[in-house]
Image (cartoon, helix red, strand yellow):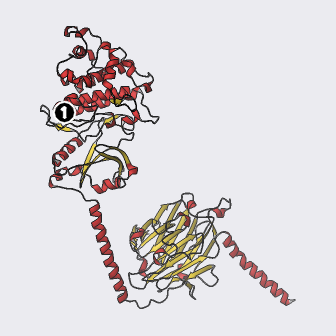
Amino acid sequence: MAVVLRSLHFLILVYVSYIPLALTQDVNQFIYNGFHDQANVRLDGIAEIHSNGLLQLTNLSRQEVGRAFCHFPMKFNTTSSDLTSSLSFSTNFVFAIVPEVKNLGGHDISFTISPSRDFSHALLNRYLGLFNNSNNGLSTNHILAIELDTVSDPEFGDITMNHVGIDVNGMKSVASAPAMYFSNKEGKNINLDLMSGNPMHLWIDYDEAEKLLNVTLAPTTIPKPNRPLLSTHIDLSQILLESMYVGFSSATGTLASDHYILGWSFNKSGPSQSLGVSSLPPLPRERKRKDKPSLMIMTVLIAVTLVLITVIGAAYILRRKKYEEIREDWEEEYGPHRFSYKNLHKATKGFKDTELLGEGGFGKVYIGTLRSSNVQIAVKRISHDSKQGMKEFVAEIISMGRMRHRNLVQLLGYCRRRGELLLVYDYMPNGSLDRFLYSNEKTNLNWVQRFRIIKGVASGLLYLHEEWEQVVLHRDVKASNVLLDAGLNGRLGDFGLAKLYDHGTNPQTTRVVGTVGYLAPELTRTGRATTCSDVYAFGAFLLEVACGRRPIELQAEGLLEQVFLVDWVTECCRRGAILDTSDPRLEGNYVVEEMEMVLKLGLFCSHAIPACRPSMKQVVQFLDGDADLRELPYYSAYFGAFTSNESSDFMSVPFSQASAPSMSSTDSILRGGR
């Protein structure tokens, strides 16, 4: 009977002693003030627990790994209403890193939360014994690691060889900081040397509500600092799974360190318990350190250094060649207006086709974003001969860069590289006007928007001709060179062909440039561009916007006969049906007086005789309603030149019966014919 009672008493004691452990596991919390045989920790690799309770992850063996994880998984990310389903957790532990050679350790300790304890696929040393080169950085890893790193690896973006980092699914830290702690007493940060061999205390706290992860470091001689070393917003619900293991992983490389864990506290439902630092197991006696690396280590280090210098030198030379630019002494005065090719290359993602906005006869245009200011730009690449007039050309570009007008695309600067010139403009998000006029997309501009664009371009052209410090001939006014900003306001752009000259002097250009359909007839004879030739192109632009047709079109598909827009509008005007030329897509929704005025003004600007065209100042007055077309001194003569009436009858010719000069009748006019 006594034996039975003693057996029953023993079973009761065992059951009662098991209850706290079970409860502890149920609420996912534990504390180890030193590790002993009964510690619920699974060891892997070269990890071992000393007789005094000290957990040693790695020793001075090279290319080895040591791990220690809890036997049972924790409940982290689940839809259950159970309190243990919260992602919040708190842990703190005391560790020590004792390097084989002073100031030369290898590699790291990491506190790790992982869905598995199986890391058979992992590489050693630089991968913490957690990852390999194929799965490093994959979101399918579902691993969170807080690393205590004593090796600087540029591939992983390490900031120093003495830092603390937060790693998600790979070796590249999402946040890191040099090892230091905040002194509550002194009110400042104080550096710590992770490889000092002294025990140090690390706290890791995650608040699910704020999605905030705090990491705090300090010597074991002081309480927890008021300020964490790292404080990072991170959503662990996207990383952690329902069942996760917590523990430590460490690895050695060519050099080695003793990595120790002296004590560990973890809580999945509140703040982790404080460790009894004074009762933690002591570190082994300090062994006699090697003051100098062995000959083999020195040889390896020297070889690695030489290889790195060679690789870095070659990369530097190739990089300089990649971004090489043309720079001459005279460009120093234009410094603020010159962009580096490197910045433009990065802004446009290497001028990829995905960033291409458009392509024309003078080059390609790319969208880009300047990283320094996060400003979007348009970069036009055009070929050039750096030996012929480049100084004068760049001078004109810089001069135009000083122009400021709400209806001009701002030219920001330039860059020269090898056989090309890059012009940098403000980016216009709605592209060019011709896309709205002719594309098959369901994009259309109503009359209010078109009339506002016409007035804006006229205002910008007036600024170029009369209001800026020099006269600027644009020489390529057309719908494709009118860009629309976010508010669909028209801005005249593409100054690649523009020329400047002083007020009161004659332009020196004699080379015919521009686009067929917008070229004034006198350009084909003299080659001399003037403000009048810009007005002629603006006249073609007016008809283009109002009619929704290009200045020159094929009469029918497959036929070579061309139809000139100005001829067609003239003929309709003669028949008294000028409004029939309005864009059918407008469906008659326009202000009749404005439409008629724009069409007539387009014909006036298209006059074959330059002196008979209005100036841009007069054009703006007509568009603003401050003047009437009939007030022009040559109003009647303009139409009389295309009728059989005598000069004395010019004033009696109604507008509806008149005709504007066409491109096909230019030669007759120049010879004095009617």
Residue 424, above or below 305: above
Pick whichever, 424 or 573, lies toward us: 573
Q: Position of residue 197 (x, y in %)?
A: 44, 82
Q: Is residue 193 left or right of residue 613?
A: right
Residue at 23%, 50% in the rendered image: 336
View extreme (front): residue? 559
- Please give the residue where the numbered disc 1 appears in the rendered image: 529
| Disc 1 residue type (three-letter) | Ala
Q: Quadrant of the N terminus?
A: bottom right
Pick whichever, 118 or 310, lies toward us: 310
Residue 289 in sight: yes
Q: How many marks?
A: 1
Residue 3, above or below 585: below
How would you rate the neighbour count of disc 1 (Cα within 10 Å): few for under 14, some for 14-19, many for 20 or more?
many
Q: Position of residue 431 (x, y in %)?
A: 37, 39
Residue 405, above or below 646: below
Looking at the rendered structure, the secondary structure element under dot 1 is loop
Q: Quadrant of the C terminus?
A: top left
View extreme (left): residue? 505
Residue at 80%, 84% in the rendered image: 9
Residue at 15%, 55% in the rendered image: 329
Q: Position of residue 476 (x, y in %)?
A: 26, 36
Quadrant in which residue 21 is drawn:
bottom right
Q: Position of residue 202 (x, y in %)?
A: 50, 73
Q: Is residue 3 left or right of residue 609?
A: right
Pick whichever, 380 or 163, lies toward us: 380
Residue 614 in sight: no
Q: Is residue 531 left or right of residue 25?
A: left
